Amino acid sequence: MTLLFASANLFKIFGDTDIVGQVLTTGLGVFSLITWTIMIGKHFELKRLRELNFAFEQRLRDERTLLDLPETYRNKRAIPYADLFADAVESYWRAASIQKEKGGDASRSRLEHAENAIQRAIARQVLRYEASMIFLASIVTGAPFVGLLGTVWGVMEAFSAISGQQTASIQTLAPGVSAALLTTIAGLVVAIPSVFGYNFLLGKVKQLVTEIENYASSLADRIELESK
C-alpha cells in the first residue's frame, strides 16, 4: 500500500512538472530501458563468446598440427579465437605461396606475416568486445548531469512562479521544488545501476582481452614450432 501511495505521489509530482522537466524525466526513463537492455545483452554476449572460445581452443589442443587443418576450421569467423586462427593460417600460406613463386624458403617471413595477422585480428576482436561500452560510460557520466539540469531548471521556475506573489510560504514553494527534484531522482535511478553494470562488464571485457592475448601467444608459438 505504501509503495502504491508513493507511486501515486510520483505520478502527481510528474504531472506538476513543467514541459522541460517532463521531457528530461521521460528521456531518462527511455535511457534507463536502453541501458538495461544493453547491459543484459552484453553480459550474455560476452558469456557466449567465452564459451565458444574455450570450446574452439580445446579442439585445437586435440589436433597434432594446425597448418594442415581442413578449411572448416577457418570458416568459424564468428568465434574470436577461430578468427585469429583463420587469419594466421591464411597469412602464413599466402606468404609461403609468394615465397615459393620467388624461389627460396623464407620461414621467418611467413611467421612474421602470421604474427601480424594475429595482431590485426586481436585489435578487431577487442573492438568487438568493447562494443556498446562507450554508450554505457556516457550514460554513467551524463545521466546525473541531465537530472541536475532538470532540477536547476525546475527550481528556477518555482521561484519565478512565486516571485510575483505578495507572500510566499513553504506550501506554495514545495510542489515546484518537489517536481524539480524528480529529475535528479530519475538521473540517479539511471546512473547508479549503470555504474555497477558498466564496471562489471568492463571487468569481463578485460578478462576476455587477456585471454585472447594469451591464446594468440600460444597460437603463434605452435605455428612457429610447426614451421621448422
Image: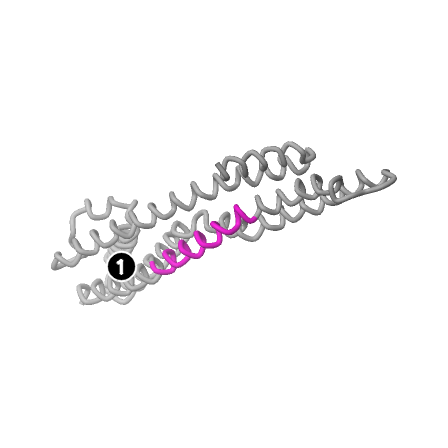
The boundaries of the magenta stretch are 188-207
In the image, what residue type sits under mark 1?
Gln
Please state if 208 lies on the left or on the right of 63 as rendered.
Answer: right
**Residue 64 part of the magenta-drawn span:** no
Looking at the image, can residue 90 be seen?
no
Placement of 64 over or under 147, stated as above or below: below
Measured as percent of width and height from the top left, residue 122 is found at: 36, 57
Report the front residue among 176 and 2.
2
Q: Is residue 58 above or below residue 178?
A: below
Image location (x, y in percent) of residue 204: 36, 56
Which one is in front, 80 or 199? 199
**In this view, 77 is above or below 216:** above
Depth check, front residue: 111 or 86 = 86
For residue 123, side relative to residue 142 (left or right)? left
Find disc 1 in the rendering and name its residue. Answer: 99
Query: For the residue carrying disc 1, how many other residues have a C-alpha within 10 Å: few (<14), some (14-19), or many (20+)?
Result: some
| Image location (x, y in percent) of residue 1 | 48, 36
- Point out the residue furthest to the front here: 1
Can you say whether 16 is above or below 194 in the image? above
Q: Is residue 165 at all visible to an observer of this figure?
A: yes
Residue shown at 62% from the left, 50% from the top:
145
